[in-house]
Image (spheres, helix red, strand yellow):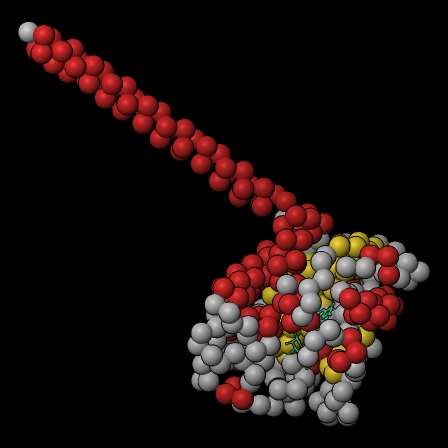
Amino acid sequence: MAVGRFQVVGNCCCTTASERMRGYAYFLLFLVVVVGTTICWLVFSYDAVSLKQVPPHVVLNDRLQSKQVKLMEPVRTDVLTVTPWLAPIVWEGTFDPQVIDTAFISQHLTIATTVFAVGKYIRFLRDFLESAEKHFMVGLDVHYYVFTDLPGDVPDNVTLGVGRLLSIVKVQKFDRWQEISLRRMEHIQTAIKDQIHREAHYIFCMDVDMRFHGRVGPEALGRLVAAIHPWFYTYTRNQYPYERRTVSKAYIPLDQGDFYYQANIFGGMLEDIQRLTKTCREHLEVDKSKGVEAVWQEESHLNWYLLRNKPTKLLSPEYVWDDAKEQAAKEIKLVRFSSVIKDKEEVRDNL
Ligand SMILES: CC(=O)N[C@H]1[C@@H](OP(=O)(O)OP(=O)(O)OC[C@H]2O[C@@H](n3ccc(=O)[nH]c3=O)[C@H](O)[C@@H]2O)O[C@H](CO)[C@H](O)[C@@H]1O
Ligand SMILES: [Mn+2]
């Protein structure tokens, strides 16, 4: 009896406990669904409302006097001006600066511009900024984000135009220049997420050892914008300096590739550059965990990304020339932005 009573009591207890357990499980499930839905809603609605909206169309005043375009008279016959996926390639002569300015300047756009000046590279910053003030997105609001380990050395007497401002973001200095260069993807991604997505419509990310010589205006704006490297544009794809080791996430086989893009300038809308920097950062981390560094660091990963995510606008080598190229080729009617010649051994801590 005692055993039976225990059994009865035991069974009775078991039934009650399992019902209670089931009830508890349902409650937990309900809680997970409610909390999960709320978090998803918060994340997605936050992104949707916080990203600055860009007006979708070019709106022009019909009284603007612009030269008539003629369908049978192409403006450039010496170079490719559109890709097979119908993205324009911007060259001198392919756009009317007045039309572009009229269309964009009235939209009150803010262009975030990231530039890293870490260690001795701080010496390039003044020329970069002064020349940018003369030629970069003139008439638009520009917010420079200077990433540096030396905030006190950022020149404080560069005169910025109306609507243009500069913020300093302190970063640590890594020993190897390659690490400083490739870590930019991580810093840019974090900065977009934490701050820039609320403040700007577009973002451009640039090297600091550069100088503007000519107009780089809103003709360069687009969802995803990349510049064609000035050294390799006559090469065949199997000669491009892509990463060729299969062990790297940046690997591109010899029979693939559109253009070789230079990482000195890329940009676009915040959402697009957020995705690009996140992917490159993750791939750089995977490589690092395997002890691999792509041949041209973040530039190799950028090229991998742009092969799968085609740029919506391409900048011709006018937009990323190199002072070390002795003579500009005849197809380059105007050098707009160019790498300065630097003493690599002097400015870098390692080879
Ligand atoms: C001709 C050539 O060799 N080009 C490659 C080289 O470009 P670059 O020679 O243009 O690289 P770089 O020395 O300019 O470094 C890239 C950028 O990182 C920042 N920085 C770098 C080092 C440093 O100590 N402090 C600092 O602030 C700075 O903004 C600089 O402009 O390397 C790049 C990055 O991997 C790309 O692979 C380029 O294709
Ligand atoms: Mn550079």
Residue at the front extreme? 2
Whether residue 26 sits left or right of residue 127 in the image: it is left
Q: Position of residue 307 (x, y in %)?
A: 51, 73
The image shows residue 65, relative to residue 7, as above or below, that is: below
Q: Residue at x 67, y 70 (%)?
A: 176
User: Where 43 sits versus 326, above or below?
Assistant: above
The quadrant of the image that shows the C terminus is: bottom right
**Total count of labels:** 0
**Residue 139 placed where, x, y %?**
83, 61
Q: Residue at x 86, y 61 (%)?
A: 153
Identity of the residue furthest to the left in this view: 1
x and y, in percent, of residue 315 in the image? 66, 75
In the image, what residue occupies the spot 56% across and 62% down? Answer: 281
Q: Picture quarter containing residue 201?
A: bottom right
Quadrant where the N terminus is found in the figure: top left
Q: Is residue 64 above or below residue 274?
A: below
Residue 302: quadrant of the picture: bottom right
Q: Nearer the viewer, residue 291 or 34?
A: 291
Which residue lies at the image location 79% right of the left edge and 81% below the top edge? 343
Looking at the image, can residue 108 be seen? yes
Q: Quadrant of residue 42?
A: top right
User: For this rendering, which residue is in front, 198 or 29?
Assistant: 29
Viewer can see residue 87: no
Q: Nearer the viewer, residue 271 or 123?
A: 123
Q: Is residue 251 left or right of residue 164?
A: left
